[in-house]
Amino acid sequence: MAFIEVTELTKVYGSAVALDGISLSVEEGKTAAIIGSSGCGKSTFLRCLNLLEQPTSGALRIGDDALRFADAKLVAGAERSLSFRKKMAMVFQSFDLFPHLTVLRNISLAPIVVNAVRRDEAEERALQLLDRMGLRNKAEAFPGQLSGGQAQRVAIARALAMNPRVLLFDEATSALDPELVGEVLDVMKSLAEEGRTMVVVTHELAFAHDVADILFFFDKGKIAESGRPQDLLENPRTERLSAFLQRYRHSFGGAKRAACA
Amino acid sequence: MGYQFDWSVVWNPSLWLDAIIVTLVYGIATTVSGLVLGLGLGLLLISRFWTARQLVSLFIGVFRCTPALIQIVWFYYAFPMALNVNLPPWLAAGSGLTLYMAAFSAEIFRGGIESIERGQWNACRSLCMSHRQTMYYVILPQTIRRMTPAIVNQSIIQFKNTALLSIVSVHDIMFTANALTSATYRPLEVLTFASLVYIAIIWPLASISHQFERSYDQRKR
């Protein structure tokens, strides 16, 4: 049984259909990448999965926590929704660190207040995570004093501190200067290699190609194509995907590929 | 024939000292309680409860759009009569100003909270923090820095508005100045001196808050 299972997920804003019956599954320990042009619903999908947006209809399951939505309401699994959300943590395009708190406090806050971890334990763990991110010397810095790449690595540490079973990345490198993209992708790659379950919305096709186990191409709120990343990226079956890839390579494929290598 | 200033009439340290204490107590008490009440109202203003939002909006509308002087008089004379309650005079005098402060600061709090980026809420929700935890640990601390200039401004206005309390016989600086004027027929000297006293009280407050802002910014940016 797949670890993450999404069935017929639909999200409607007024009369605009953002997600139109998305069904997909991800095995435990695997990395799924989602690509598509802007407005295709890939970020909305991730936000619905993390319940930052209320799905209009459909079913979500992670492990043994299952939720079902109908008419924009949670109709089954309400008692499981917190445990469902605790299974994942999200890394955002805009980092969204807490600017008034030190790096150490950014990482240890949620474990302390949500999971009632003792402060010294939470800080010890935060320091370990910072070590791993190569940022131990920034523990007492404030987010405003970090580069974009450092800030995003702190955000990854903050997500990891909650011990999530699934990591969600919402265009985690899109707001970074090109020369800083690599350091964040390296961290993401090492997380994938140690067998974390990850769902990664990305524009980094090289990353998707090299790191993801399964790739989904979203188009107009639907999954237009899915499968092994190598197959999709090297031999697109649909007109839409080959057009997307062509446009992509044309505009900024080369530079991004170099940054990832 | 120039006016002959006679500054000796303002020389009455114990009288002024009492008045300064009264002004300080009313200024601080109505500002602080107004801020606390305003925070509560501000939170209601952005809450999910439609009825609460409407009631608070109505309250704010009424108290922002009427002169503080009328509110003070109304609370002192009309409110106890209308509701047939016996408020102690000191409380009746302070209530109007407190609610006046609350109405203005509620709007400042609402604006401050709404100015915090949506991403902060998303990050907290993704980390499974509750609404209350998000507000307390993440949103309000950032809000307070952003609101400090507006809050200080409103507090200064509030301190000066305590002068209006003299109309309901609160023995503050203004009341003392009026009494002294009637006794000496020296309004120029007395009022000028009273102004200096107000400046001496309020100016330091403003500069302390400036220092707070500056030290906060140096630490974090």
Image (cartoon, rainbow, N blue to C red):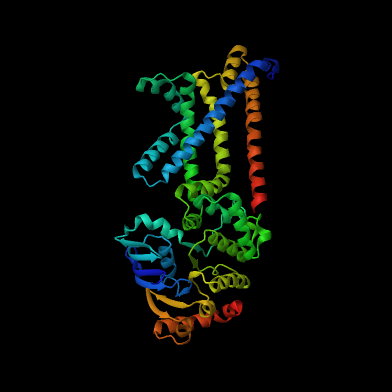
Give me the residue at 55% from left, 40% from top.
Answer: B151
Say left or right for B117 vs B13: left
Q: Residue furthest bottom?
A: A235
Report which quarter residue A14 is drawn in. Answer: bottom left
Location of residue A170 in the rendering, given as x and y in whole percent from the top left corner: 49, 67
Q: Is residue A151 above or below residue A32?
A: above
Q: Residue furthest left?
A: A71
Report which quarter residue B87 is drawn in. Answer: top left
Location of residue B54 in the rendering, given as x and y in whole percent from the top left corner: 36, 41
Instruction: Name the foreground residue: B185 vs A110.
Output: A110
Location of residue B105 in the rendering, given as x and y in whole percent from the top left corner: 49, 39
Q: Is residue B97 above or below residue B57?
A: above
**Count of marks overlaid on the render:** 0
Q: Is residue B185 above or below residue A97?
A: above
Instruction: Name the foreground residue: A184 vs B63.
Output: A184
Location of residue A49 in the rendering, given as x and y in whole percent from the top left corner: 41, 64
Say left or right for A254 vs B2: left
Q: Is residue B16 above or below residue B124?
A: above
Instruction: Name the foreground residue: A244 vs A230.
Output: A230
Say left or right for B91 vs B156: left
Residue B115, can we see it?
no
Residue B212, can we see it?
yes
The quadrant of the rendering that contains the N terminus of chain B is: top right
The quadrant of the rendering that contains the C terminus of chain B is: bottom right
